[in-house]
């Protein structure tokens, strides 16, 4: 998107803009930006060391995914090595995807899943700033930090008595990544800047390159360098700098991707290399300090929306660097509340850095170390992309959610077309056995070219819709509702065509069940009425009915959907296992400790299953038994999901234990947290990969432990663990129903809760079984105290 | 054929040694004290005692680790162009003279003086050996058209020393029909020097084992030694020696050969440095020390690949293998870590960081410093590594070989105390990614402030309190001189055998003359545990706890505090089961009473534990 973040239109004018253009999503992702606002002074920021992650070692070429530090402006991102002798940036653009529409099914009626046809997220460029005299083995007192409060990566070291400092940040106002080198003590910088593509481009000059994929996507990047006190010049394929007192390197780039199915997701008029050159030239006309101030002001506008304290850490803990601290936390099994709060904020940093104005984040967000990320770094629609965005609204980052909405809206025409033409292919085992087809659905993997990969995923449409719907519940944004309404309606149409009548043997009741499907990603491939689909469709129908009523549209069709919803089969508890059934069967047809919690989707993210007496106790017990059986030790995202479920069941200690498990240091590729706090997924023994979902799912779980909400109801400290009980606070938490809450507590009990309306009018506020009702006008707020134990 | 380099080298005169010491900026310092840990001596000092030498030829020979060049690295490499006439064909007179001239021009002024011809000088390019009429190796006329003396003369003319090589035993091809006479030994033929059953020996079984119960055998050695002395060689590497060289058992026990060589060399009247190779058996260290001037502790450093060496094959092995030998290095006899191939990054096959680390370990281990690089093609970084006078001084000065003061984990610290009370401290990051490495002053035995000098970079880094932490690249290192400005560390000792401790599994108390209190806790295997109870500290914090232990091989144990998570550490070998050493680990203790547990793990074998020392202040 091209909104100027410093001159953000009010909601009303935004709506007007949307109405006027009617085509927000058709703007290209890489586009000219309005002139940035330049703040006069740097903002004063408190929070101090709590908001800083720091380390005592850099990354190198071979350890970027675990030791590189991420920066990003929501569109382009990079991993930075911070090596004194070689600052290496691996730069990715969210749209830097190979592949295409991928609309020729394989022999099994499923989508090809490869890097050529389906495609993969890949690197845009490598930028290296080499300073040969600053070899890591020759410097001392090395330190690097990620300043979460300002969104800046810094590093410093001493070489021959001179202190050298470096800043790396990705600016949204200037749409570029900036590396700024300074020193104090009479030092000089001499070295080279090298910008290279990663797809075998033949670079003509030192300052930019361009290329194109077979699928037609064009891309390009450009760099500019400027300094003082020395010389900066182009020499061959590099930029040389000699004896500079300070140096600034600005890099930008992008593609001609356009989120517009009607133009096959390309903007043929856009020359990415030329645009990148224009952008770096514009940025380079400003001092690095000016660029930094503009960036920090922009970044603060989002980061500052939430603050959190989970308690006080010990002096010993505070004396450790972040990686030592992660290891010590696991070793001592001792809570480190400040580290845990920083981990939450790191998730918010990644969200702000990775999801603004372009495509949403897939399995790795904007951070790759090569062109062959596992599972293509794609959009997995059977948990991962949804989990990526569970945190956004809760954590004051509703704006970051928009990338997901815009993506789905832009893909809808293509998804609809592929569903119409391909879903009922006779080879597709998941086709509608009725032969009917309507609406849209997706594959388990999706790309940004309108295509799917791997297997069909019939219920994926419902989960995407329910995720988009939740954003509406948080924000009550009517424009958002209007944007997603066609998605909801199309998904309802798909299920209207797909549901099968079925007579229950025991009661003789006629119900509707989902056609043959696979409960992600285990068990039989041809199970009808899987709980996953039944729950998702049940919620989809409910959401559509509310949307229809809100917008005053399709009243008749909403009644039809209501009729279908009433007839939907909902899962029961297996008399054999005591678990909520996954396959409409009393038997356990899969792995007991499987990573996915698909049959518990009604517990979280759904909330049909509630432990508050409104759900039959046998269902709650069956869900609890199933969750227990799934175990406490899985992959990062799977632990995060478990934590959220335990939080919903108000089991604070289990919810916390799973958070703690995710904070375990990853060694030799094991599941856990890497040096740079990225979550590592152990693909096989000894090989771990970065998967970003747990970096968002875990913070979501932490917030869910502090605050539960659904429209009209919120509950304070529903699952507060002992580790955080002594005292703490969190401000700026988004809650469903259209409110934002600031909450503080002491000795496990709320001391104060401030509820602000961002559109919501009435909600109950509950703590420990007693509740009160709050009524507010939009914009109004109330502060509650004196909570009963 | 896997060989290892060895060098013949004349005894260095005291005068020459003094000149060298001045050249590297260090005064010659006499050995300080005798002996490593002995009965009743608590282990736990950073290595500072220099073992007295009683090697062959006396202490004046190999007073310091020798320095020079060896041919084998280039001979053994498949690096393009090095061996155009077949494997190992690099070894020729022309190449040796070329390297001699380069050594004289570039490195001699830094103390490098030996030019060592390795295996193959008596073999043609098909590796077929050639012998004289007395069953002695004779130079291949293609490789050395002017014979071996001419080469030595050229080397000497450049002010350098000449080294040569032989395998141990009577090479099979030299046996002939058993009737080949032995030079200057009337009545002796090859049949009279070996065992009647022609049993083979050496690391490749390429020779018949000499039978020293037969007087003729010694005569054969005498004749070889005489020949080398006559040619003017100053250094002999005897290769394939056992026990070692991958072999054990009587058939491969070459102690008698080595003794005979020592005697034969002495009889020539020519000072010849006598080096043994390879992977010599640690259990026979006293023999090697008695009869030779140095012994290869490990397999070849060369990779036999497209470069000279590689990190994994096998530079990094030395970190595990050197500690068992460190106390044995001293004037007269040194632990030989093999060639130091750091002079040309592309040929070496190593990163800059790996090359510095390689040189650092060699220097602190007091290993001979002989490069196998092409001295005509040193790159500027390689030259700077090979000619860093401060680092060369670490190798050549009177400070004993450094030992690990931390466990042998991915990040480790080695140290030795210098004569002036400062410490030589090396930081290593053996991990495949950059990492911070910390040297705690408490692990060196003092506390407070210390000044730090960076030897590789010739810089004083300033004052550091309690510890120094530096970022090291993957496989990287730092080498410092740390000069304490604070006080001695005071610690409370907790004996492993104390009744207050809790033993689990098979763990039991045993006698230990090398241990404090003359006891230790052993049998820590397959679930054996030792828990120190009631470790009292006044203040919560990180404490650098020193663990004294005995372990004849490198073993791992898990260390935990107060029943919390355990950290597995690898304890470097102490060399044998009668020697105690210490390493320090950082442990987070709470104020008041704590427990510290050392656990073998369910399937592991842990070292025997002598004692732990808990500082009275946190670090």
Image (cartoon, rainbow, N blue to C red):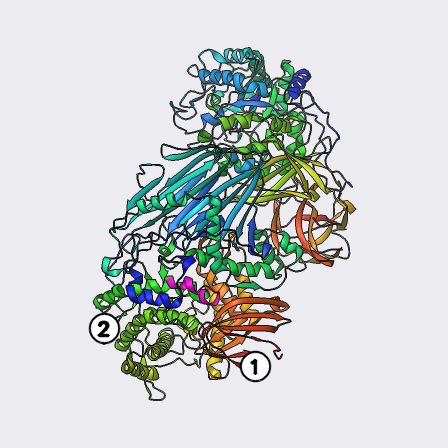
| Residue that badge 2 annotates | A437
Q: Nearer the viewer, residue B49 or A490?
A: A490
Drawn side of residue B299 relative to residue A554, left or right: right
- Give SS at disc 2: loop
The quadrant where residue A571 appears = bottom left
Chain of the residue under the numbered disc 2 shown in the image: A
Q: Position of residue B595 (x, y in %)?
A: 71, 58
Magenta-colored span: A392-402
- Residue A212 lies in the magenta stretch: no
Whether residue A663 is visible to the viewer of this picture, yes or no, is no
Q: Which mark is residue A258?
A: none
Q: Which mark is residue A769?
A: 1
Given contact means CB atoms under 8 Å apart, are the residues at marks 2 and 1 in contact? Answer: no
Taking the spot 54% from the left edge, 35% from the top edge, the residue there is: B246
Q: Residue B432 appears at what percent x and percent y?
A: 50, 44
* Disc with the residue nearer the chain's start (2 vs 1): 2
What is the spatial separation of the Cα atoms under label 2 and label 1, in whole angstroms? 47 Å
């Amino acid at each position: 998107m091209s909104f100027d973040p410093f001159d953000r239109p009010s909601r009303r004018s935004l709506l007007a803009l949307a109405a006027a253009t009617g085509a927000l999503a058709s703007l290209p992702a890489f586009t000219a930006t309005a002139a940035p606002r330049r703040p006069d002074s740097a903002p004063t920021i408190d929070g101090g060391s709590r908001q800083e992650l720091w380390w005592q070692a850099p990354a190198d070429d071979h350890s970027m995914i675990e030791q590189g530090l991420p920066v990003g402006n929501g569109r382009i991102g990079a991993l930075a090595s911070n090596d004194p002798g070689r600052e290496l940036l691996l730069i990715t653009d969210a749209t830097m995807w190979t592949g295409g529409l991928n609309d020729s099914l394989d022999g099994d009626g499923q989508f090809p899943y490869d890097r050529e046809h389906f495609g993969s997220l890949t690197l845009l460029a490598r930028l290296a700033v080499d300073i040969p005299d600053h070899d890591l083995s020759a410097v001392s007192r090395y330190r690097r930090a990620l300043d979460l409060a300002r969104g800046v990566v810094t590093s410093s070291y001493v070489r021959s008595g001179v202190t050298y400092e470096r800043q790396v940040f990705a600016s949204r106002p200037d749409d570029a990544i900036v590396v700024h080198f300074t020193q104090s003590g009479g030092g000089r910088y001499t070295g080279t800047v090298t910008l290279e593509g990663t797809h075998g481009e033949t670079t003509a000059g030192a300052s930019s390159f361009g290329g194109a994929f077979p699928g037609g996507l064009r891309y390009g990047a450009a760099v500019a360098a400027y300094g003082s006190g020395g010389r900066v010049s182009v020499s061959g394929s590099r930029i040389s700098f000699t004896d500079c007192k300070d140096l600034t390197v600005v890099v930008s780039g992008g593609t001609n991707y356009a989120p517009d199915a009607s133009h096959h997701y390309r903007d043929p008029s856009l020359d990415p290399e030329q645009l990148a050159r224009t952008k770096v030239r514009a940025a380079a006309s400003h001092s690095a300090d000016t660029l930094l101030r503009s960036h920090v002001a922009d970044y603060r506008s989002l980061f500052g929306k939430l603050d959190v304290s989970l308690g006080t850490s010990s002096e010993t803990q505070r004396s450790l660097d972040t990686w030592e601290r992660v290891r010590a936390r696991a070793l001592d099994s001792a809570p480190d509340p400040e580290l845990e709060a920083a981990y939450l904020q790191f998730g918010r940093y990644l969200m702000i850095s990775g999801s603004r104005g372009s495509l949403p984040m897939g399995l790795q967000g904007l951070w790759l170390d090569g062109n062959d990320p596992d599972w293509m770094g794609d959009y997995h629609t059977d948990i991962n992309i949804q989990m990526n965005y569970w945190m956004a609204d809760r954590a004051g980052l509703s704006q970051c959610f928009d990338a997901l909405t815009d993506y789905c809206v832009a893909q809808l025409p293509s998804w609809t077309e592929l569903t119409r033409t391909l879903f009922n292919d006779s080879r597709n085992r998941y086709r509608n056995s009725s032969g009917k087809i309507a609406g849209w659905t997706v594959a388990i993997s999706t790309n940004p070219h309108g295509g799917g990969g791997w297997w069909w995923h019939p219920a994926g449409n419902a989960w995407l819709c329910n995720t988009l719907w939740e954003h509406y519940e948080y924000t009550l944004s009517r424009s958002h509702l209007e944007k997603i309404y066609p998605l909801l309606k199309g998904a309802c149409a798909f299920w209207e065509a797909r549901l099968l009548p079925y007579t229950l043997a025991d009661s003789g009741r006629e119900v509707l069940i989902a056609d043959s499907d696979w409960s992600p990603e285990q068990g039989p491939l041809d199970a009808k009425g899987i709980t996953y689909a039944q729950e998702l469709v049940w919620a989809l129908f409910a959401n559509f009915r509310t949307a229809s009523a809100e917008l005053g549209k399709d009243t008749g069709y909403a009644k039809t959907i209501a009729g279908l919803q009433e007839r939907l089969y909902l899962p029961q508890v297996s008399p054999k296992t005591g678990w909520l059934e996954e396959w409409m069967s009393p038997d356990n047809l899969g792995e007991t400790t499987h990573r996915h919690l698909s049959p518990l989707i009604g517990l979280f993210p759904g909330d049909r299953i509630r432990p508050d007496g409104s759900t039959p106790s046998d269902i709650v017990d069956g869900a609890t038994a199933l969750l227990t059986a799934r175990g406490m030790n899985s992959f990062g995202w799977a632990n995060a999901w478990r934590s959220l479920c335990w939080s919903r069941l108000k089991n604070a200690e289990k919810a916390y234990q799973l958070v703690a498990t995710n904070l375990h240091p990853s060694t030799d590729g094991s599941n856990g947290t890497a040096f740079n706090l990225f979550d590592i997924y152990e693909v096989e023994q000894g090989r771990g990969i970065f998967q970003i979902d747990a970096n968002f799912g875990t913070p979501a779980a932490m917030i869910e432990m502090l605050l539960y909400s659904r429209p009209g109801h919120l509950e304070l400290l529903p699952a507060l663990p002992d580790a955080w009980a002594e005292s703490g606070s969190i401000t700026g938490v988004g809650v469903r129903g259209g409110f934002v809450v600031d909450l503080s507590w002491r000795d496990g009990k709320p001391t104060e809760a401030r509820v602000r309306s961002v559109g919501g009018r009435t909600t109950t506020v509950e703590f420990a079984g007693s509740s009160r009702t709050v009524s507010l006008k939009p914009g109004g707020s109330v502060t509650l105290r004196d909570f009963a134990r | 054929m896997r060989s290892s380099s060895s060098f013949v080298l004349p005894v260095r005169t005291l005068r020459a040694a003094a000149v060298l010491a001045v050249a590297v900026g260090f005064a010659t310092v006499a050995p300080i004290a005798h002996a490593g840990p002995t009965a009743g001596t608590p282990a736990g000092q950073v290595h500072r005692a220099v073992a007295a030498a009683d090697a062959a030829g006396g202490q004046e020979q190999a007073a310091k680790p020798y320095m020079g060049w060896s041919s084998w690295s280039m001979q053994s490499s498949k690096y393009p162009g090095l061996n155009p006439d077949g494997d190992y064909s690099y070894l020729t007179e022309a190449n040796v003279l070329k390297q001699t001239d380069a050594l004289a021009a570039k490195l001699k002024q830094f103390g490098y003086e030996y030019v060592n011809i390795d295996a193959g000088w008596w073999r043609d390019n098909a590796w077929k050996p050639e012998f004289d009429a007395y069953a002695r190796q004779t130079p291949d006329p293609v490789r050395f058209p002017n014979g071996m003396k001419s080469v030595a003369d050229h080397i000497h003319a450049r002010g350098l020393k000449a080294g040569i090589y032989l395998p141990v035993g009577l090479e099979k091809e030299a046996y002939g029909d058993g009737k080949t006479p032995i030079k200057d030994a009337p009545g002796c033929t090859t049949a009279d020097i070996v065992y009647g059953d022609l049993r083979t020996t050496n690391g490749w079984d390429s020779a018949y084992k000499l039978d020293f119960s037969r007087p003729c055998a010694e005569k054969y050695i005498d004749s070889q030694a005489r020949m080398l002395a006559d040619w003017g060689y100053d250094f002999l590497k005897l290769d394939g020696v056992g026990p070692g060289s991958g072999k054990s058992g009587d058939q491969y026990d070459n102690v008698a050969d080595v003794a005979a060589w020592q005697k034969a060399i002495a009889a020539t009247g020519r000072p010849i440095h006598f080096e043994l190779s390879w992977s010599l058996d640690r259990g026979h260290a006293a023999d090697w020390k008695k009869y030779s001037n140095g012994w290869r502790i490990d397999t070849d450093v060369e990779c036999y690949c497209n470069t000279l060496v590689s990190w994994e094959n096998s530079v990094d092995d030395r970190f595990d293998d050197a500690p068992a030998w460190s106390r044995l290095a001293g004037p007269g006899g040194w632990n030989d870590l093999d060639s130091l191939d750091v002079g040309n990054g592309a040929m070496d096959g190593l990163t800059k960081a790996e090359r510095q680390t390689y040189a650092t370990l060699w220097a602190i281990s007091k290993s001979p410093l002989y490069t196998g690089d092409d001295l005509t093609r040193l790159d500027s970084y390689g030259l700077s590594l090979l000619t860093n006078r401060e680092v060369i001084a670490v190798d050549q000065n009177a400070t004993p070989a450094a030992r690990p003061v931390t466990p042998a984990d991915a990040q480790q610290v080695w140290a030795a105390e210098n004569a002036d009370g400062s410490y030589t401290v090396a930081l290593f990051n053996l991990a495949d990614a950059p990492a911070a490495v910390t040297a705690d002053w408490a692990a060196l035995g003092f506390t407070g402030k210390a000044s730090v000098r960076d030897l590789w970079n010739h810089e004083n880094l300033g004052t550091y309190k309690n510890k120094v932490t530096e970022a090291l690249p993957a496989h990287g290192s730092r080498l410092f001189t740390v000069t304490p400005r604070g006080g001695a560390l005071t610690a409370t000792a907790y004996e492993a055998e104390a009744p207050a401790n809790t033993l689990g599994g098979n763990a039991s108390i045993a006698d230990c003359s090398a241990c404090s209190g003359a006891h230790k806790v052993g049998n820590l295997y397959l679930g054996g545990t030792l828990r120190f109870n009631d470790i009292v500290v006044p203040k919560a914090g990180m404490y650098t706890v020193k663990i004294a232990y005995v372990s004849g091989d490198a073993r791992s144990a898990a260390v935990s505090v107060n029943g919390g998570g355990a950290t597995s550490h690898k304890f470097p070998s102490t060399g044998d089961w009668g020697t105690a050493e210490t390493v320090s680990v950082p442990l987070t203790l709470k104020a008041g009473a704590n427990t510290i547990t050392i656990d073998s793990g369910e399937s592991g074998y842990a070292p025997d534990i002598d004692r732990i020392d808990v500082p009275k202040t946190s670090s």
